[in-house]
Amino acid sequence: MTTDTETCLQTASEFLSAWTLTSAKPEASRLDIVLPRNNLLDAVNALVTAHWGFLSAITGLDHPGAAVPDEGKAWDRLASDAEAGGAASTAWLEVLYHFCHGAAVLTLRVRLSYQNPSIASICSLIPSANLYERELSEMFGIEVLGLPQAGYLLLPDDWPKGIYPLRKEFTGFNHDNQETGTGKDHD
Amino acid sequence: MTEMQPSPHPEKFIVPIGPQHPALKEPGHFEFTVDGEIVTGASIRLGYVHRGIEKATEGQNWVQNLYLLERICGICSHIHALAYCLGVEKLANVTVPPRAQAIRILFAELERIHSHLLWLGVSAHEAGFDTLFMYSWRDRETVMELLEKLSGNRVNYSANLLGGVKFDVDQEQSDAIRKGLDFLEERTHHYMKVITTDETFLGRTRNVGILTNAQAEALGAVGPTARASGVPRDLRVESPYAAYDQYPVKLVLDHRGDLEAKFVVRINELLESYRLIREILETLPAGDLTVRVPRRLPEGEAISRVEAPRGELFYFLKSNGSDKPERIKVRTPSICNFSTIAAVVIGQNLADVPMILAGIDPCFSCNDRAVTIRRSTAQDEAWSWEDLRRYGNEYYR
């Protein structure tokens, strides 16, 4: 079982080596690979073509105050995406695509700047990603490009624009504003 | 591949089901586009009881979150707590005593029994077979009483602690469980016979709502929904957690992918759970029930995957080194299986929709249910879920 899992992860890391910026093994059964945003579809396509497991979940992360880990290339591309100078370096978002194959979990990690929080939809390759991507986009304000979408999946229809509940800056509504739905953040 | 397309064709009828509709863990809203009796498209809207639990976890400490997360689902409460505990224990780098791990899976299997029996009853009801519904729910009381006997609770057993379990199993409880299982096993064999031989019932299940093996693979189906389509996906087997490495589970598979296969798989899983529980009771390891877990967890990320009654439950935990989590992501099995609905219903009869929805075992509740037959030109005509169910049963009369 264990050797199978290792072989699985080894195979995956070989498929993805062309686009891998950095990789890590947080646990014996896990492999995390950081990808440039523009290569997400290439990487997912490689996994789908090889029938490597299935997309188990997509996790969004908000890093409002954290510095991007000092990983050279990864940060350079993020900064050049932003084209907004140094401000971008203290706030960024991350999208994690978890693929499971037996006991093995492969996580593709893509970093996005606050200035340009957009990422390509993987629905053309994995149709079931639809629900996960809609949730990601509503909760984190990440624009998923090419996602077939009609209104909200999870948020109420009258949810105010520009408020993303799973961003750290969102801490609930003031009671005064709640009824009018103006959605000023609580301090 | 089928897509959850938002905009229906104007010349078609749309049958919205929900949101006050119980065939989902949360009230959900499906819109089925129909051409006469045949379904040609489906879309989904969720969130009617989105409680913001993921966000709420960020404001509470690791211990408090155990009680919050156990309340995500009232049917599979234990498995949520278990997934969370296993993740936290990975972050804290502690090893839980073997007796506690065995008791955890004992609860998990009892929970699977109550969940599968509940599902059997609800699906039978959707098919208009209320006798089976009533018998299976009567029998389900046996396992509910066993859970109550062990923990004092029927629904949120609260058996887990970070680092172990709260409840031990004594001889008297163990005997009661064995006795209950003997009764249930006999009943389960009877149900197997009923669902595979009753002609009327087979008319509603055999070759209805087929999810092919390729679809199940491609859409990422999990749990009995996947296994009824021949996809060997069971985390208890693939990636044994808690004590499943000590108590191996036999994988239950069926290759037909229709509704009948979903019944057969779940009923065989009941039998496998009875076997497993007896084995656990026979060889329950001696020892402590808990190990100490620190209030503050080291910085890091953990992924915890467990086999809930409905399939893989996925937890992602991120710690920032404090006593509160930085982020907790929960992906429930029903979300994976929703995608299969859109693929399966295309080309099926509208009358089969209740059964197909029931087939993936989304959590049912007893809410009133509303269905509106909406025509693009005429005014709305409201149907309750009961009407749709009756329509389905009349259609097959």
Image (cartoon, coloured by chain):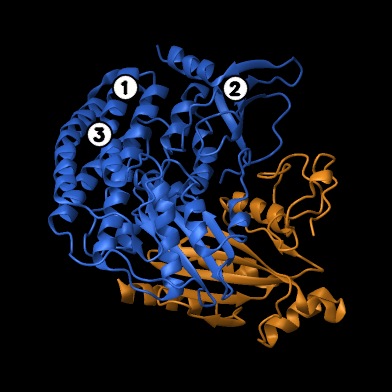
Chain colours: A orange, B blue
Where is the N terminus of chain A found, in terms of image quarters? bottom left
The residue tagged 1 is B134
Q: Closer to the camera, B78 or B266?
A: B78
Where is the C terminus of chain A found, in terms of image quarters? bottom right
Can I make out residue A55 in this image? Answer: no
Q: Identify the residue at image location x=19%, y=30%.
A: B187
Circle nearer the N terminus (3, 2): 3
Mark 1 and mark 3 in contact? Answer it, CB < 8 Å: no
Q: Closer to the camera, B121 or A100?
A: B121
Residue A66 versus residue A173 in the image, above or below: below
The residue tagged 3 is B142
Q: Dot 1: few (<14), some (14–19), or many (≥20) neighbours within 10 Å?
A: some
Residue type indicated by callout 1? Met
Q: Dot 2: few (<14), some (14–19), or many (≥20) neighbours within 10 Å?
A: many
The residue tagged 2 is B370
Circle nearer the N terminus (1, 3): 1
Across and down, in percent, residue B239 comes to 34, 64
Query: What separation in Å lies between label 1 and label 3 (alpha carbons)?
Result: 13 Å
Across and down, in percent, residue A121 comes to 67, 58
User: In which image quadrant can residue B378 be found?
Assistant: top right
B52 to the left or right of B227: right
Front disc: 3 or 2: 3
Q: Dot 3: few (<14), some (14–19), or many (≥20) neighbours within 10 Å?
A: some
Q: Identify the residue at image location x=78%, y=40%.
A: A158
Q: Are marks 2 and 1 on the same chain?
A: yes
Circle nearer the N terminus (2, 1): 1
Across and down, in percent, residue B344 comes to 49, 37
Q: Chain of mark 2?
A: B
Front disc: 1 or 3: 3
B136 to the left or right of B336: left
Q: Chain of mark 1?
A: B
